[in-house]
Image: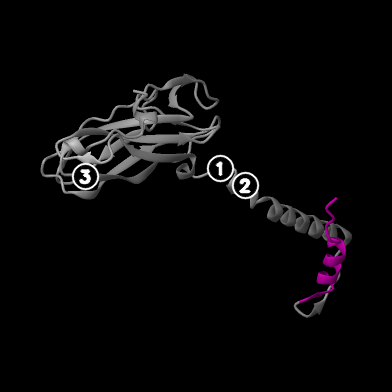
């Protein structure tokens, strides 16, 4: 059992001398002084635990990035997959959002010289009911895969290359929504001189299309 200090005794000791002038506190003031200190101590004990119960949106989703070819050959077409692993008890809004005020999941690419990219393929969401919404919402939960088609041109530089990506989403629990976040990501590729050198990779992801 947690024991608190005797704040009544402490209040008497503090009240015995204030700014060098001897004073005495009445019983009612001593009681009020003790309760105030007790409340302050309880608040200090409990307050550190509160922020840890609400994670950052960055901590809710763990993205992993894969390419369907390794290496990628000049002149070959391939896919980049962004695998979103969503924390249990949370969800993110799907690409097709249910309400105008919601932030849809969005993936953007900025391919460097030597690469072209197409439109992102988003999975279908699932309608779920939550306490903060009167209507079911279209959301992603658990693990979802976003797919970006890319072509390595004949002019693509050889060796290790990076394609910058930006993943934007809004994570929510059953009770509340966190502020939207944008994560900067990189897809790392190894480019070979010939398309014939390209080899399929990560069939566990790209074989599920």
x then y, percent, for residue 127: 45, 19
* Residue at the bottom extreme of this rendering: 20
Residue 101 visible (yes or no): no
Instruction: Tell me: 118 left or right of 46.
Output: left
- Crowding at label 1, few (<14), some or many (≥20) Cα neighbours within 10 Å? few
Label number found at residue 54: 1
Mark 3 Cα shell of 10 Å, populated few (<14), some (14-19), many (≥20): many
Mark before the other along the chain sequence, 2 or 3:
2
| Residue 65 sits above or below residue 6 on the image | above
Q: Distance between the residues labelled 2 and 1?
A: 8 Å
Judging by the rendered image, the residue that carries numbered circle 2 is 50
Mark 1 / mark 3, whichever is N-terminal: 1
Distance of label 2 from label 3 (alpha carbons): 48 Å
Secondary structure type for disc 2: helix
Mark 3 falls on what kind of element?
strand
In the displayed structure, would residue 166 be above or below residue 105? Answer: below
Residues rendered magenta in the picture:
1-18
Quadrant of res 180: top left
Q: Quadrant of the C terminus?
A: top left
Front position in the image: 165 or 138: 165
**Label 1 residue SS:** loop
Contact (CB < 8 A) between labels 2 and 1? Answer: yes
Is residue 62 within the magenta segment?
no
Coordinates of residue 71 in the picture (x, y in percent): 25, 41
Q: Which residue is labeled 3 in the image?
A: 191
């Amino acid at each position: 059992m947690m024991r608190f200090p005797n704040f009544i005794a402490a209040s008497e000791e503090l009240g015995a001398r204030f700014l060098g002038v001897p004073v005495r506190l009445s019983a009612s003031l001593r009681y009020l002084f003790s309760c105030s200190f007790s409340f302050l101590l309880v608040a200090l004990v409990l307050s550190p635990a509160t922020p840890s119960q609400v994670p950052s949106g960055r901590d809710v989703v763990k993205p992993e990035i894969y390419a369907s070819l390794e290496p990628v050959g000049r002149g070959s077409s391939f896919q980049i997959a962004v695998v979103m692993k969503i924390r249990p008890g949370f969800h993110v809004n799907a690409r097709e959002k249910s309400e105008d005020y919601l932030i849809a999941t969005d993936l953007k690419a900025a391919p460097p010289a030597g690469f072209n990219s197409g439109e992102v393929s988003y999975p279908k969401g699932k309608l779920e009911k939550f306490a903060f919404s009167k209507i079911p919402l279209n959301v992603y939960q658990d693990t979802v895969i976003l797919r970006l088609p890319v072509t390595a041109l004949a002019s693509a530089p050889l060796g290790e290359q990076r394609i910058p990506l930006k993943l934007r989403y809004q994570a929510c629990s059953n009770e509340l929504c966190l502020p939207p976040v944008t994560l900067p990501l990189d897809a790392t590729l190894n480019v070979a001189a010939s398309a014939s050198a390209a080899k399929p990779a990560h069939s566990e992801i790209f074989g599920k299309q």
